[in-house]
Amino acid sequence: MRLARHVATGGSEATLAPRRHLRLPGGRLALRASAAMAAALAAIPLIYLVVRVAQAERTEVVEALWSPRIATLMVNTVGLVLAVSAACLVLGVAIAWLLVRTDLPGRRIWLVVSSLSLAVPSYVAAFGWIATTEVRGFWGAFIVLTLCNVPLVTLPTIAALRLANAASEDVARTLGRTRWRAFFEATWPQIRPAALAGVLLVALYVLSDFGSVALMRYPAFTWAIQVAYESLFDRTLAAVMSLVLAAMGIVLVVAERRLRGARARVGSTVAARTAPVPVALGRWAWVAHGGLAVVAALSLGVPLGALAKYLVLRTETSTAVRPGDLLADAVSTVGLAGAGAVVALALALPIGILAARFRSRLATVTESASYLGLALPGIVVGLSLVFFSLNVAPMLYQSIWMLAFAYGVLFLPKTVGAVRSSIGQVEPGLEDAARTMGLSPARVWARVTARIAWPGIGAGVLLVALTAMKELPATLLLRPTGTETLATSLWRLTSGTAYAAAAPYALVLILVAAVPALLLTREVAGGRRRPEETL
Amino acid sequence: MSELQVRKIVAGYDSVPVLRGVSFIVPHGSLTAVLGPSGSGKSTLLRVIAGLNRPIEGAVVVDGTVLSGPRVYVAPERRRIGLVPQDAALFPHLDVLANVGFGLPRARRRAQEVLDLLEMVGMADYATRMPGELSGGQRHRVALARALATEPDVVLLDEPFSALDAALRAEVRGQVRQVLRRAQTTAVLVTHDQDEALSMADQVVVVDEGRLVQAGTPAEIYAKPVSRWLAQFVGGALVLPGIWEDGAVVGPLGAVHATLADGHMAQAGDTVDLVLRPEQLSLRAAGAGPGRAGEGVRALIRDVAYFGHDAVVTMDLPACEEPVQARVLGDQRWQPDSEVVVGVRSVGLAFAR
């Protein structure tokens, strides 16, 4: 291949050889340059946050950092993250085991039901609990976040369990292990990387969750940042808190990437060839049904119950929302999310192509930069871009462009993933074959690679747009004055205890979130997609 | 001494029996092959012996101790019965040494005895490798060492060679047989491959549709199958109709000396089935003149499959609709479309209809 290129580019074109086009070095250079540019843009929120903190008075920063308030917030946030992560680990692995390794009747239906909580955005679930129960504070946030995030552990664990060799558990039993120890010594090591990667993702979502902790009035970092930002005096404090939160997010993302690398290395080299004999539950099947039903009732029943209650009430009270408002909010939501998805695609294309086709340091660096969108909580990206637009680009302050850019950064990892996997599915052999038929590299891209990859990329961008419609914290900070989205209206109405008015918003948001949840659950459980793609 | 007794086992999943009353005895230090088509219940049988499946009826007894039986159920971890699963199922997160030492107390896991075991299965140089780095045959040898490490009373092997390619299979079979002999371990091997059963086992137990068909030495199973089905399942056989004439069957091949199979009765003049192995047929080039009576029957060669050491000749017999196959030594060449005279070299087996 390489030799052929040298021949083709080195001398005059041989008349006998098939016509070859000179490789355009400009094409790859442009790709590299635009990937580097996209990565730099994606890094703006983090960089500007650092700049903003560095510009502040040194004493103010130190004071903010060592204030008891930060210590309390730290304890609160870390405590919530640990509690939810532990609960999701136990629940997620138990549910995955029930659904893969036992003879529980109706396992397929339970799989769908137990993944449906992905269709309830956490702040919508919080609305449901607030509107119908007295639960608030730590326990409120703990319950809501655990129930919403369990599938992030369940689904990848199911995928790993299906690949894990069940016979090794049988062998462990014949070698003197009890049922429990056989599971922990033979099966758990095989599913641990998947389960822990899921848990780290849960930790990341809890860390960056704003809506439910704020609605539950649990003083975690995200809510405190918003409060500090609104009070105007405490902007340096807000910046310092954001930086601390960003650092924690980055640590979690790095850990998750490491685990994923480890999983790829161990792999399923000793995959099972025979279907394992399912564990007979016998009478325990009823206990299992009961447990799964309780989880489903709490995660789906409570929000849907609140919806039913207040949608019926709506017609009888005067505080009802006007359909016109809902429609206007829906229109602006769709417009903003669409713009955000387009920005995300523009940033993701060069990074994704580079990552799929050219293994180089630049590809690694730019792809890592794109993961900042996962590491940085929405509130942090929002706050940093407020500072950035105020100080660097005042004409963009509170413009829809700044908000679209925030969406672009926040949803960049998903979009890069879609671009990368879609292009990765195009076999390089196809491109080589097209080249031998006399097509130039550019035309190969246009007629082969792009043609095959675009449906996947398009679907990915649509899912990103749907996901962006649910975004709350960055939208709260960056939206133009007077503009509301579905999420901000739900937030405003729920904060003002206008539950009946909030209910229609909650319903629409659940419908929006249900699409990726329903579409992708099967793929994640089959190990073909990553769990974060469903949220 | 470790003698395994399987007594009238009825077992299955969700109380639908897969096994319907299977009994046999495996003497100490011997290897018994459980042979049967897929779905016959042989893997379930292994799970019952290992204690991974609790039988509905019947008993599993080792050296007079009941492990499974009415009101008795010893958990698999207390049975001292080792298992080598179909796909080896090494623990993917542990290296070879740790895999073999898995069943030993912590202090002994890295001791010399583990290395000795690896030496015995010829894997001593691979102690620090991960399972993913081993070939299929190597994985099975490690799995065998792992099962033997705890010095179990009985070792169970579940289709241990089906994942290997043909060339490797013969080699690994021999190695495993040798290791089991040296360790003097009582072993049960489950397989659907009759070559494997006949070549490795001291005793072959044939199971079909959850029932025991026949138990005996490989030679008995091959030479004296109790049914037509078994004759055809083990080793391939031609079945020809004929008339029983005390000590011979008269049919398409003329009069052939035969004995009645165990449990079969026939009167002179009854219609019976004559079962012959392909290697019992002999071929002779047909001379110009007509053959003398009693010398054999003329047949037309349709096809010759040549294997080097031997060859399978497919022929059309005049009085027979189905083609007939003979296995002959490879040093004689036969041409398709030529005529041969077919004779029978040894005594056939007759089954009453």
Image (cartoon, helix red, strand yellow):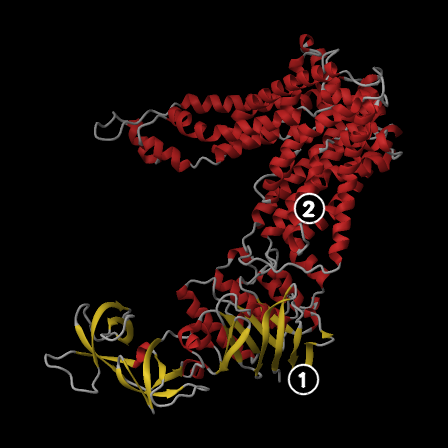
On the question of residue A123 being in view, the answer is yes
Q: In the image, A422: left or right of B12?
A: left
In the picture, the quarter occupied by the N terminus of chain A is: top left
Farthest-out residue, bottom: B246
Amino acid type, label 2 = Trp
Task: Give the class, few, some or many, for how many residues have Cα within 10 Å of label 2's Cα (few <14, many ≥20).
Answer: some
Between residue B44 and residue A152, name the one nearer to us: B44
- Vertical side of A456 occupied by B138: above or below: below
Residue topped by disc 2: A110
On the question of residue A360 being in view, the answer is no
Amino acid type, label 1 = Gly
In which quarter of the view is residue A284 placed? bottom right
Residue A464 in percent (x, y) is at 61, 27
In the picture, the quarter occupied by the C terminus of chain A is: top right
Number of the label disc, if any, that sits on residue B300: none
Q: In the image, A444: left or right of A260?
A: left
Residue B76 in percent (x, y) is at 68, 69
Between residue A135 and residue B348, name the one nearer to us: B348
- Vertical side of B174 occupied by A360: above or below: above
CA distance for labels 2 and 1? 46 Å
The residue at the point 36 percent across, 82 percent down is B272
Label 2: which secondary element: helix
- Vertical side of A451 occupied by B68: above or below: below
Residue A211 in percent (x, y) is at 78, 27
Residue A230 in percent (x, y) is at 82, 17
Disc 2 versus disc 1: nearer the observer? 2
Asked if badge 2 and badge 1 are on a common chain, one would say no
Between residue A213 and residue B312, name the one nearer to us: B312
Residue topped by disc 1: B64
The residue at the point 68 percent across, 24 percent down is A46
Q: Number of numbered discs present?
A: 2
Q: Residue under mark 1: which chain is it in?
A: B
